[in-house]
Image (tube, helix red, strand yellow):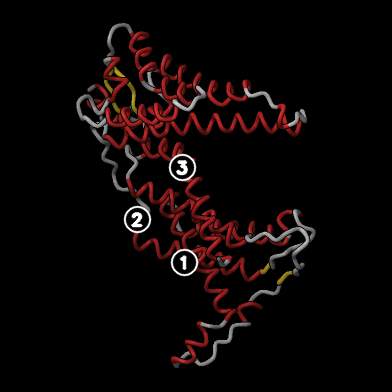
Amino acid sequence: MSDQVMNAVIATALGSVVAVVLLLPVAAVEYRRDGRLGPRDLVVLLSGAVYGLALWTYTLLPMPASDDYRCVGRQTVPFDTIRGIDWGDLGSRAGLSALAHDVAFQQVALNVLLFVPLGWFVRRIARRGVVVATLLGFSVSLLIETTQATGVWHLYDCAYRLFDVDDLMINTLGATLGSLVSAIFIRRRRPEVVWPTSITLGRRWVGMVCDGLFVLLLGSTLSIAWRAVQLYVVEVPFEDLPTTPERLLQWGVPGLVEVAAVLLGGRTVGEWVVSVRTTGGRGPVPVARGLKLVTGVGPFVALLAIPGAWTGPVLALFVVVSLAAAIPRAGGHRGLAHAVAGLDLEIVLPRAVREREPFRSAS
């Protein structure tokens, strides 16, 4: 497999993981800014994450072995790389074909194309124009070139990739062109947001997914951090690592956060992310919230924490039942836990929307 194909595979795989991790903050922002998270937003999230990883893979990978690389110098003469292009006779087909096969031209063209998407993402996500795209393109390119010039910040004794001042200019040009081209298709002024009046199934499922991600990501982070401290700070041998403290951190801490969120605030972390809250309830508020906890996120965390071969199939069945129970539109796709607790769901509108549409917040 060629290095280019391998870089694409790595960028796609790691970018997909990054997109999953970023779903929590992205969903929280989008549901408060636009009131929804659509398929287009998910495509932008995935493509942006893959593109960010592609910048890393194509500019730094493959990283050579510590004893198998050649030191390279620096190209600090402006336009020296560009002057190396054999322009030939551009008025003929043969001249154009020769130019397309010229290595120096291919390098310049690929560097421009590599940074064109950056200008598009700046306009699509940050809603900023040419100036911001140009400055960001220059900054990202400078970071890449500096990383190459320092041997990945002195991880290697010398640089194994060439620092080229022309790359700074070419990459920046690519980001600028990307912003200019995207201006044709993307309007900087946001259209007036029409806020949804009811909770969709997609919103409910995104909230459930965010609950699962929160538990897994927080638990994994705490578990890895604890294990790193034990291995590299306390210097406990791997075979002597105690499992109980690690499991308490991995599942106990996220579980306690979810318990506190439900009992004190009436909604899970995922429901906070998608900006919905509960109303009503069967009996006193603490009872309703307790029922919501023991029939919703509580069993999910418990099944993750309990060791045993039977917990996997039971957890999968519970997840399927919970997702399916949210399909009926009655009660705003409230699902199993809310149906048991007699709770309804409503959208939490931003303050600016509540002030503009007081009848909505009162309904």
Residue 344's disc number = none
Q: Secondary structure at mark 3?
A: helix
- Report the Cα–Cα distance between label 1 and label 2: 16 Å
198, 69: nearer the viewer: 69
Q: Give the SS element for disc 1.
A: helix
Badge 1 density bin: few <14, some 14–19, many ≥20, Cα 10 Å: many
Classify the position of the N terminus by image quarter. bottom right
Mark 2 Cα-neighbour bin, 10 Å: few <14, some 14–19, many ≥20: few
Residue 177 is tagged as: 1
First reached walking from the N terminus: tag 1 or tag 2: 1
User: Would you identify the image quadrant in which residue 7 lies?
Assistant: bottom right
Quadrant of the image containing the C terminus:
top left
Residue that protrudes farthest toward the top in the picture:
284
Q: Relative to 78, does residue 200 appear above or below in the rendering? A: above
Label 1 vs label 3: CA separation?
29 Å
Q: Position of residue 343 (x, y in %)?
A: 28, 17
Asked where in the image residue 243 lies, by quadrant, the reply is top right
Q: Position of residue 166 (x, y in %)?
A: 63, 71
Q: Please give left or right for residue 117 compared with residue 69 in the image.
A: left
Query: In this orientation, does residue 192 appear?
Result: yes
Task: Give the number of the disc on residue 20.
Answer: 3
Residue pointed to by mark 2: 187
Q: Is residue 109 above or below residue 191?
A: below
Residue pictured at 72% horizontal, 27% vertical: 240
Contact check, label 1 and label 2, Cβ < 8 Å: no
Across and down, in percent, residue 108 comes to: 56, 74
Distance between mark 3 and mark 2 Cα atoms: 28 Å
Q: Amino acid at mark 2?
A: Arg
